[in-house]
Image: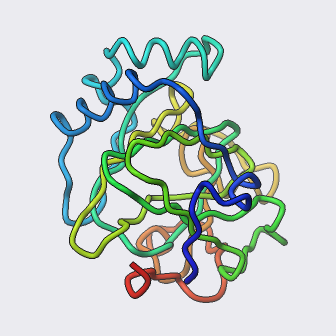
């Protein structure tokens, strides 16, 4: 798979590089390194106290999200597969302590609640570069950028995202994709999530970039 960089013009269809915040990024990366593990698989924590209480987090909340309440968590580990794609009704902020790769597609490429994995593109995010992934972008767990090194990635989202699941009666097909608060999920049939009952919405190959890194 061709791995582009977030500096490539193609990335502007999916997100943007956030300029500035040099001291804040340094503070967040230090907290990630000190307080979060790198498991053999992947692990996700929606809100991490050690990140939430940083002065950097308060500043980012008051600017990037215009003062709307945010949560600062992480997704760490080792991963080379697509498995699923999700979207939110909001942007997501990512920042890694190491280089990492995002597998992304666009919501408008979903047809009848299915997406061909050929539509997915890979983007390398360098260590220390903060990016905004737009609400219109499909994404999931980051991938490692090298065979022998995992990743630690900040996940900044509106407060309450991915925490619990609202009670509802599905009024349409999209409602059936809702798997957590502010989280709509498409799973590949080979994924653990599909076996647990998630909507099988990714067709084609379950992308694995292990040979490309």
**11 above or below 21?**
below
Give residue 147's position: percent from left, percent from top. Answer: 27, 76
Residue visible at 66% across and 44% down in the picture = 16
**145 above or below 7?**
below
Residue visible at 56% across and 51% down in the picture = 179
- Would residue 91 appear left or right of 161 to someone viewing this image? right
- Would residue 51 appear left or right of 129 to someone viewing this image? left
Residue visible at 75% across and 49% down in the picture = 136
- Would residue 53 appear left or right of 168 to someone viewing this image? left
Give residue 35's position: percent from left, percent from top. Answer: 18, 34
> Is 201 or 17 nearer to us in this picture?
17
Quarter of the N terminus within the rendering: bottom right
Give residue 181's position: percent from left, percent from top. Answer: 56, 38
Quarter of the C terminus within the rendering: bottom left
Residue visible at 28% across and 23% down in the picture = 49
> Is 129 or 86 nearer to us in this picture?
129
Q: How many marks?
A: 0
Res 3 quadrant in image: bottom right
Give residue 158's position: percent from left, percent from top. Answer: 56, 27
**23 above or below 208?**
above
Res 71 quadrant in image: top left
- Would residue 158 appear left or right of 143 to someone viewing this image? right
Q: Which color mode does the image show?
A: rainbow
């Amino acid at each position: 798979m061709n791995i582009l960089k977030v500096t490539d013009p193609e990335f502007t269809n999916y997100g943007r590089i956030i300029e500035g915040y040099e001291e804040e990024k340094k503070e967040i990366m230090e907290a990630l390194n000190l307080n979060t593990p790198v498991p053999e698989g992947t692990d996700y924590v929606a809100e991490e106290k050690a990140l939430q209480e940083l002065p950097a987090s308060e500043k980012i909340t008051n600017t990037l999200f215009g003062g709307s309440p945010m949560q600062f968590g992480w997704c760490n580990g080792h991963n080379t597969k697509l498995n699923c794609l999700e979207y939110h009704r909001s942007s997501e902020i990512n920042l890694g302590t190491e280089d990492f790769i995002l597998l992304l597609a666009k919501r408008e490429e979903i047809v009848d609640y299915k997406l061909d994995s050929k539509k997915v593109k890979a983007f390398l995010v360098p260590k220390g570069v903060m990016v905004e992934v737009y609400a219109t972008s499909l994404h999931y767990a980051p991938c490692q950028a090298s065979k022998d090194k995992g990743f630690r990635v900040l996940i900044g989202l509106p407060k309450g995202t991915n925490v619990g699941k609202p009670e509802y009666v599905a009024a349409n097909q999209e409602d059936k994709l809702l798997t957590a608060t502010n989280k709509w999920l498409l799973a590949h049939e080979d994924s653990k999530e599909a076996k647990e009952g998630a909507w099988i919405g990714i067709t084609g190959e379950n992308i694995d970039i292990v040979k490309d890194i």
